[in-house]
């Protein structure tokens, strides 16, 4: 009965079913007040007690300060966000202004707002662009980016509204968790998160851990392993699974590697790991697809946006293996002091809302992981873009040839074309091919992402050909040049289907903004990764049909959803433990709880020192001791859980639930950690030298890392070593 009730509720709350009628009535009432408000010499400070008056005043403030009169639908989007929803608004419908008005509304209620974006450029652009509107409403605004100093961050977070990229906000949270002086904190308590490009941040980036590391050491990979696996042949020495997410040595491959190394692989686990990492780097990670080389370093490419994923890296072993593969020096690695996933970061905020052009497709994930619903806001003008059926081919070579011919034919009319490719390598191959046909094009990919906004803004000009990896330039309007409307508007071509239909819809959405004409079409072949990775068993050659392509995307989306759900299952308990530790840490940092605890545990030592150094010095020493051991023990706990998760999947062979087993062991480990903090703190306090000048940190053995650094870990796309072994076993059983 419970499952039936759940299905009914899920149907009634299906994505996009938020009733907009109440918002539309408020906006209509605001329209009736517009003329009166426009005649005012000075606008009153708006109050949300009367939402229609608020809408009228905010609309007039935007008109006066920005020269933009918000459309009714922009006000509806604002009200949807003020009600705690994700507003789905089509490309070109003015999400930036709607988001600013919503942020101002929260701020006017006395709530501090963080407008969270996908990159530095959008954070700075939108904060500065919307600045006059905020000022007119009596709301202060600031922004942070990668280059912001400590003082600049502190000043920005002190504003009513702060714009910042999700990574930098997360890094500031992590840095604050290691502060030993409350005066050094920069982050205020989380209150409201308004997420721009919500599907990208909340879904595509949700599993990405943000990491604070210390005690850096060189990475470790054996160049000889990279040279060895380079000689191995696919299908003979190693095989890939059906989705090309896993690779393993065949019997012949094992013999070849063992003969080359002169060892028994399975008697030397460390060497086996080195070989497997080198093999993964060689067989499953492709240069100019998964990463690029720039300035002598490996830079990951964000799989959902086609841009360089700044500061991201794979887990250290795989990162070092790729660097060895490319004959590059190993980058620094270090001990993880703390980490937080993007999902964990966003769920810290008691109130959450957002906006994007494609939310309905991920509505189930937004509801399951963030308790957010989707409000589909109609466009100001009807969309007249013509979306043509996919062009389907059996072979990739035929698809590529037809794609080029389509570009040549359409370009001859002067109509601007935007081609979305699946990776960097494809964009550069297509550019060379077009050059050979005498066509000039602008290539926008992960190698020149700093210029993407300026490039993509010109994609609607007559005769323009723009080749772009996926959603590069997202957040920038493409306006049609002179005479382009008569040619049919911007023509968007996809060189293949993405693993998510939502990403395809984002590409389509580059054309047809604000009622402009436009068109789109996708070229798909049976040799595309989407088909070969996800429906290989169901595809019996020939030209694939539209149903198969759609099915492949649904399979891929299901795989991604399960990975997301599985990641959250493992991190949920950790987030609970982290929350408790942070509450304890905050009490120690801001008060005298450490001193009280140590005075109770070691009363004689405390009394003796208090007479000689004074209570203030003693409390500060106690604070430093307890903070050190709390941070040290938490880092050890994280390392233990990482190791535990690495091997927990083997329990499935005994018909046990890996998740349940993980939680069963994680809970007592957490209790042991807390006990160790207490015992280590007492031990240090009893032995430490504490004078009137304070605690001698080095002599007490509580010296912290001389430097810390931050990065994002791109989740190992191949799972843990034991997950891969287990998957191979399961696959073999199924085939039998």
Image: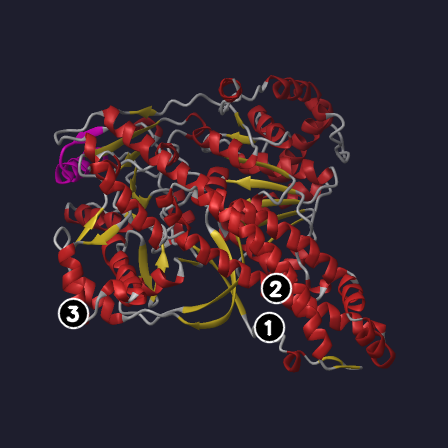
Left or right: residue 284 versus residue 479 is: left
User: Cβ–Cβ below 8 Å for labels 1 and 2?
Assistant: yes
Asked if residue 61 is among those painted magenta in the image, a careful observer would answer no
Q: Which mark is residue 631?
A: 2
Q: Is residue 320 above or below residue 717?
A: below
The Cα–Cα distance between marks 1 and 2, rounded to whole angstroms, is 10 Å
Does label 1 or label 2 sit earlier along the sequence? Answer: 2
Secondary structure under the numbered disc 1 in the rendered image? loop
At which x and y percent is residue 499? 32, 37
Q: Which residue is mark 3?
A: 260
Q: Which residues are magenta?
A: 391-412
Q: Which residue is mark 1?
A: 704
Whether residue 490 is visible: no
Q: Which one is nearer the viewer's eye here, 29 or 667?
A: 667
At which x and y percent is residue 111? 71, 41
Q: Which mark is residue 16?
A: none
The Cα–Cα distance between marks 2 and 3, rounded to whole angstroms, is 44 Å
């Amino acid at each position: 009965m419970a499952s039936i009730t759940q299905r009914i509720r899920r149907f009634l709350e299906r994505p996009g079913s938020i009733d907009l009628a109440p918002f539309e009535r408020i906006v209509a009432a605001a329209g009736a007040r517009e003329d009166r408000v426009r005649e005012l010499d000075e606008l009153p400070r708006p109050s949300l007690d009367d939402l229609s008056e608020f809408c009228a005043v905010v609309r007039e403030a935007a008109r006066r300060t920005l020269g933009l009169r918000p459309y009714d639908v922009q006000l509806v989007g604002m009200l949807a966000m003020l009600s705690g929803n994700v507003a789905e608004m089509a490309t070109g419908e003015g999400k930036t202004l709607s988001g600013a008005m919503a942020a101002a509304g929260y701020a006017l209620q006395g709530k501090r707002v963080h407008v969270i974006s996908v990159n530095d450029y959008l954070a700075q652009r939108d904060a500065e662009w919307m600045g006059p509107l905020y000022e007119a409403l009596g709301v202060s605004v600031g922004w942070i980016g990668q280059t912001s100093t400590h003082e600049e961050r502190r000043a920005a977070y002190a504003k009513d509204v702060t714009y910042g990229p999700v990574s930098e906000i997360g890094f500031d949270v992590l840095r604050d968790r290691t502060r030993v002086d409350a005066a050094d904190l920069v982050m205020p308590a989380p209150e409201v998160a308004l997420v721009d490009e919500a599907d990208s941040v909340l879904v595509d980036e949700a599993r990405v851990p943000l990491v604070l590391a210390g005690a850096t050491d060189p990475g470790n990979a054996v160049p000889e392993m990279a040279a060895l696996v380079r000689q191995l042949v696919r299908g003979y020495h190693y095989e890939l699974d059906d989705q090309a997410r896993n690779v393993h040595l065949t019997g012949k491959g094992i013999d070849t590697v063992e003969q080359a190394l002169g060892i028994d692989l399975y008697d030397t686990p460390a060497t086996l790991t080195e070989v497997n990492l080198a093999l993964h780097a060689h067989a499953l990670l492709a240069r100019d697809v998964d990463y690029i080389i720039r300035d002598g370093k490996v830079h990951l490419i964000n799989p959902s946006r086609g841009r360089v994923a700044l500061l991201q890296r794979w887990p250290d072993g795989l990162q070092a293996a790729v660097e060895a593969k490319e004959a590059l020096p190993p980058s620094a690695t270090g001990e993880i002091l703390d980490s937080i996933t993007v999902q964990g970061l966003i769920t810290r905020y008691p109130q959450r809302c957002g906006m994007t052009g494609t939310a309905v497709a991920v509505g189930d994930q937004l509801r399951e992981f963030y308790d957010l619903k989707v409000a589909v806001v109609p466009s100001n003008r009807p969309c007249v873009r013509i979306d043509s059926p996919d062009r389907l081919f059996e072979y990739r070579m035929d698809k590529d040839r037809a794609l080029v011919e389509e570009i040549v034919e359409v370009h001859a009319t002067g109509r601007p074309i935007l081609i979305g490719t699946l990776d960097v390598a494809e964009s550069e191959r297509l550019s060379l091919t077009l050059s050979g046909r005498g066509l000039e094009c602008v290539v926008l990919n992960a190698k020149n992402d700093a210029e993407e906004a300026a490039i993509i803004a010109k994609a609607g000009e007559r005769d323009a050909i723009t080749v772009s990896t996926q959603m590069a330039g997202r957040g920038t309007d493409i306006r049609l040049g002179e005479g382009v409307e008569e040619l049919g508007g911007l023509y968007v071509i996809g060189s293949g289907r993405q693993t998510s239909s939502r990403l395809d819809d984002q590409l389509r959405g580059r054309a047809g903004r604000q009622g402009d004409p436009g068109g789109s079409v996708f070229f798909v072949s049976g040799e595309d990764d989407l088909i070969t990775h996800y429906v290989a068993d169901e595809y019996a050659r020939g030209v694939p049909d539209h149903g198969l392509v759609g099915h492949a995307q649904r399979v891929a989306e299901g795989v991604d959803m399960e990975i997301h759900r599985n990641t959250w299952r493992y991190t949920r308990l950790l987030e609970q433990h982290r929350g408790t530790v942070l509450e304890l840490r905050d009490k120690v940092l801001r008060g005298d709880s450490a001193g009280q605890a140590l005075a109770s545990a070691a009363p004689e030592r405390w009394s003796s020192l208090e007479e000689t150094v004074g209570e203030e010095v003693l409390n500060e020493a106690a604070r430093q001791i307890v903070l050190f051991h709390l941070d040290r023990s938490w880092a050890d706990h994280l390392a233990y859980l990482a190791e535990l998760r690495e091997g927990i999947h083997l329990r499935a062979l005994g018909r046990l639930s890996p998740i349940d087993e993980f939680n069963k062991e994680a809970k007592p480990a957490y209790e042991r950690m807390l006990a160790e903090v207490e015992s280590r703190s007492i031990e240090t306090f009893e032995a430490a030298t504490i004078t009137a000048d304070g605690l001698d940190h080095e002599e007490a053995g509580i010296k912290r890392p001389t430097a810390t650094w931050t990065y994002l870990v791109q989740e190992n796309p191949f799972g843990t070593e034991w997950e891969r072994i287990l998957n191979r076993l399961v696959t073999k059983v199924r085939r039998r």
